[in-house]
Amino acid sequence: MKGKRFLMVVGVLFLALTVAALPFVGACAAKPAAGPTLKYGMSICVTGVAAEKGTPMAHGKLDCVKYINEELGGVNGYPIEAIWYDNAYDAARAAVIVKKIMDEGALFFTTNSSKMMSCSMEIANRDGFPGIASFSSPVCTNPPKHIYAQMPDYGDDWAAFANYYMENIWEGPGKPKMALHLLNNPTGYGARDAALCLADELGIELLPEEEHAADTISEMESMTRIKALEPDVLFISSTPAPTAVVIKNAYELGMYPGIVIGCAHASYTKALVDIAGADIVEGVYGVYGTVEWGDDVPGMAKMMAYCERYHPQDAENMDYMFSWAEALIGAEILRLALENCGYEAIAWGDAAAWECVEKNGIQKLDYDVLGLQSPVKYTPGDNRLAKSVRVFQIIDGTITAISDWIVAPRVPFEQYPDLFPWAVP
Amino acid sequence: MGLPCGTHNYTYDQDMAILRTKTHWALLIALLVLLFTFPLYGGGYWLSVANLIGITVIAAIGLNILLGYCGQLSIGHAGFIAVGAFTSAILTNVLGLPFLVGLIAAGLMAGFIGLIFGIPSLKVKGFYLAIATIAAQFIIIWVINHLEITGGFVGIAVPYASIGGLVFDSEASMFYLIMVIVVMCTFFAKNLARTRVGRAFVAIRDNDLAAKVMGINLFYYKLLAFFIGCFFAGIAGSLMAHWIGFMNAEQFSLMESILYIGMIIIGGLGTALGPILGVIFIRLMQQGMIFVAPTIEAAFPALPAGFATGIAPMLFGLIIILFLILEPRGIAHRWMLFKAAYRLWPFSY
């Protein structure tokens, strides 16, 4: 009994101390550089159901900040202070984290998923706090407020691929029949929304869409329905694991090879090849906003060196590269804000600083991102910073670029208020 | 409830009083003063944490009425919160109705949907009822995703809450709105347990067959518990929607529903204080976890990749397991023991 009582006392004390101390652990979380810094807020999901994407993305942007501070001496002499928290892909936590980042005087913030941005964006918009979503759905930037997208969204992916398909792949008479297989969230339905707007204009006949869950293990039923409709092309907007399931089922049903399969950027990473198997996904098309790993572009060598040194397990992961590029864009935004406003104007990280960073940093962007992704430039009324993607194809098990940058036209959602009331200003 | 030595009840009113002594009143007033002056010294972040805790407390009180008092297991609570959130969003954004209409309608709609999914409770209980309510979670989310008026998969923007000309457009003003409702809900729940309805709930929880023999209408009271529990969830959902400003169905996952059950178990099932303590415990621990990976990575850069990020969920799980082993009756029980010991201190007996 004495042992149990002792254990209980120790346990309760441990729990009480842990709970009491946890919120204050934050005091040691950020290790600010000596002297004035530029605070860069990051809400990242390194745990939770999206950790397989969030973790390499966290590595990419934090490694890039390290590179900028250590080798470039910061931005115009001011080191970047990364203020980052793990949102665990949880809406409640993401909503609170954006407040935490604002409180700590960050000049802008980024999220690496559209879901986390959708939970944070109105809180940021209401206070005029600028944010950038690495991966974004159309609702993040429509109507345009204070949230920007690092690259074209899931709807733009569809538009870019459909354009490319009609110009370079489709050779038959009449309209090609396109089937859509969509993840049951904005990642999937962003593509569907763009297709509803633009399919007629592009001369594509849309078949009834099918949807799947992120944890699907078989899509034989939905793929059988699609097969019966005899599509010419199948577009998948999802994440790698369910995309692999859909393609494997298409393969097993004898649909593929035979039809063309295209993927949106969230589906299309090395993980897709690893999960589905190189033989099965051979020839599958996809769009993505970065160059290939190892391409001869100015920013590649340094990024690969840091990846090799600090996170070698992320080698060839395009999410790492994409996130590294995000930090480069962040540094460029800060450089522009410093040049146009001066450090004193942004030092406090308050509403005036946010306005300065947005108007004189983000909206003045015209940057090639050292060739790692499509160039970024702000256009009034279009909060997508990059506006082009490249088309890739899996050739001999390797994701290989087959096009130069092609424009992903902005989808005019606001012109269809009945279909997309959220896009109306 | 135990009373301090020498305090006796001589009248029925005294016996029924929640606040029986001057110390009780003093502590309550001190607590309310501390609570309602919090915006004066809490920063934006801590206010937002407090708002999140407040909203969660309202939903947890509802679940505690359903599960803690009436014994009806529901694993679809996040779904009912979603019903409230989207009802309020649609009424205020699409139809332009006042916030108060949205708030009340959110509670009523969630309560009504709760009634529908509560119907199986007459025939099934325990794990079987859990499965039925899991179905509620999935059906509700599916419907929200496939309705145009909810914004489908994309979601829907929600305006600031406002009453008359008073717009709740800051964390501090939302804090007052949320906390007033928290106090009202807590007061309601505390009193509900002492009414005929509350005693019927407890009788059903303890032995529904015996309750039926005593003349308690099981169908009515079980459905009433579902209605009240889900009404609270709907109110919480409405506040959540106006606080975050944008809703989509992804924000109401099954994991969130399970977490709510965890909160009231850790706090103490079937007590008025339990949901509050459980919510504070879990939400603060979650806030602590957002710092864990950054702190460890900053302090120990040489650790293998993935180690720091793996620590947070492991620590979270470990603390909950330890808690359930060491204090399975919840924090509220530990608090009662502490009060009893404090009253007797320094004497053991």
Image: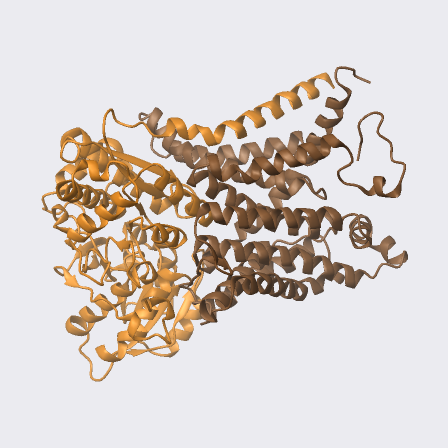
Question: What residue is drawn where x is 20% and y is 84%?
Answer: A173
Among all residues in the image, which is located at the extreme front? B165
A17 sits left or right of A241 in the view? right
Question: What residue is drawn where x is 42% and y is 75%?
Answer: A225
Residue A252 lies in quadrant: bottom left
Q: Is residue A248 visible?
A: no
B17 sits left or right of B173 in the view? right
Residue B151 lies in quadrant: bottom left
Q: How many marks?
A: 0
Question: What residue is drawn where x is 36% and y is 33%?
Answer: B294
Among all residues in the image, which is located at the extreme top? B346
A64 sits left or right of B244 in the view? left
Residue B30, placed above or below residue B206: above
Residue A369, placed above or below residue A250: above
Residue A350 percent across, percent down from the top left: 30, 41
- Which one is nearer the viewer's eye here, B138 or B100? B100
Q: The N terminus of chain A appears in which quarter of the rendering?
A: top right
Q: Is residue A144 visible?
A: yes
- Which one is nearer the viewer's eye here, B188 or B271? B188
Residue B7, placed above or below residue B99: above
Chain A's colour? orange
Q: The C terminus of chain A appears in which quarter of the rendering?
A: bottom left
Residue A379 percent across, percent down from the top left: 17, 60
Q: Which chain did the renderer colour brown?
A: B
